[in-house]
Image (tube, grey):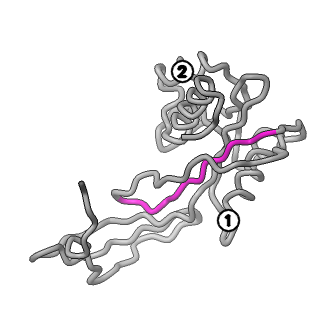
């Protein structure tokens, strides 16, 4: 059994800020390694994000958008970064409505996870939306989205084709699969 022990914790010796952007910052830390020696750690700081698994009439709401970092279009569940001090559930509700036009009568937490803990501190909160009501979408001025709804089989096919290839959406599809098998939504 793995057990956390303080003797293996890295202690920060120094931090050098490298970049401060609108969404992320980059810093390089020098750390004291367990035992002897030092190492550098390149760390991305991110305010966190919220995402929503929204099912309506047996279909999952998704958005398709161009992702510059990957240089391709990507199909994803609605999601977005947290504003400073924003409650993740409020962010999830906001993003669902902004991106799809749907409002959730109820949001339930499904999971929270770090997207890439080897170099980033981004924590993503995943919610399940219930009692959806159609409204008007209001994407951000720099967001160009196509809203779709996918059957479970289409979502699986999109994963195989890598049209869906981000962790949050794949995790949402797996949660949906559990729901289809057990009648309970959760991980």
Residue at image coords 76%, 51%: 93
Query: Which SS class for mark 2?
Result: helix
Please, what secondary structure does the residue beneath circle 1 have? loop
Closer-to-camera residue (55/135): 55
Q: Position of residue 154 (x, y in %)?
A: 60, 17
Q: Nearer the viewer, residue 187 or 87?
A: 187
Disc 2 to disc 1, how far (Cα)?
A: 32 Å
Measured as percent of width and height from the top left, residue 153 is found at 59, 16
Quadrant in the rendering for residue 78 = top right
The C terminus lies in quadrant: top right
- 177 sits to left or right of 27: right
Q: Which residue is mark 2?
A: 156
Query: Dot 2, crowdedness within 10 Å: few (<14), some or many (≥20)?
Result: some
Where's residue 10, x and y in %?
A: 25, 74
Magenta residue span: 119-130
Q: Can you identify the residue that label 1 sits on?
A: 83
Report the residue at 65% width, 28% height from top.
183
Q: Which mark is residue 55?
A: none
* Up/down of 13 relative to 179, above or below: below
Vertical arrangement, residue 79 with respect to residue 172, above or below: below
Indicate which label's residue lies in the foreground, 2 or 1. Answer: 2
Residue contact between numbered discs 2 and 1, judged by CB atoms under 8 Å: no
47 and 183: which one is in front? 183
Residue 105 lies left or right of residue 128; in this view the side is right
Residue 87 highlighted magenta (yes or no): no
In the picture, the quarter occupied by the N terminus is: bottom left
Total marks drawn? 2
Type of secondary structure dominating the magenta stretch:
strand
The residue under the point 73% across, 22% down is 58
Q: Which residue occupies 41% across, 52% down?
A: 116
């Amino acid at each position: 059994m793995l057990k956390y022990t303080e003797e293996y914790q890295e202690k920060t010796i120094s931090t050098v800020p490298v970049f401060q952007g609108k969404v992320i910052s980059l810093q390089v830390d020098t750390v004291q390694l367990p035992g002897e020696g030092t190492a550098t750690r390149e760390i991305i700081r991110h305010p966190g994000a919220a995402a929503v698994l929204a099912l309506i009439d047996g279909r999952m709401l998704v958005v398709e958008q161009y992702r510059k970092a990957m240089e391709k279009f990507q199909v994803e569940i609605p999601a977005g970064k947290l504003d400073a001090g924003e409650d993740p559930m409020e962010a999830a509700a906001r993003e669902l409505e902004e991106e799809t036009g749907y409002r959730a009568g109820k949001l339930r937490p499904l999971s929270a996870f770090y997207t890439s803990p080897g170099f980033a501190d981004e924590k993503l909160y995943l919610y399940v939306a219930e009692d959806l009501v159609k409204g008007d979408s209001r994407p951000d001025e720099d967001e160009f989205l196509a809203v779709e709804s996918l059957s479970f089989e289409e979502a699986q096919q999109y994963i195989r084709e890598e049209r869906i290839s981000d962790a949050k959406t794949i995790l949402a599809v797996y949660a949906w699969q559990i729901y289809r098998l057990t009648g309970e939504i959760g991980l």
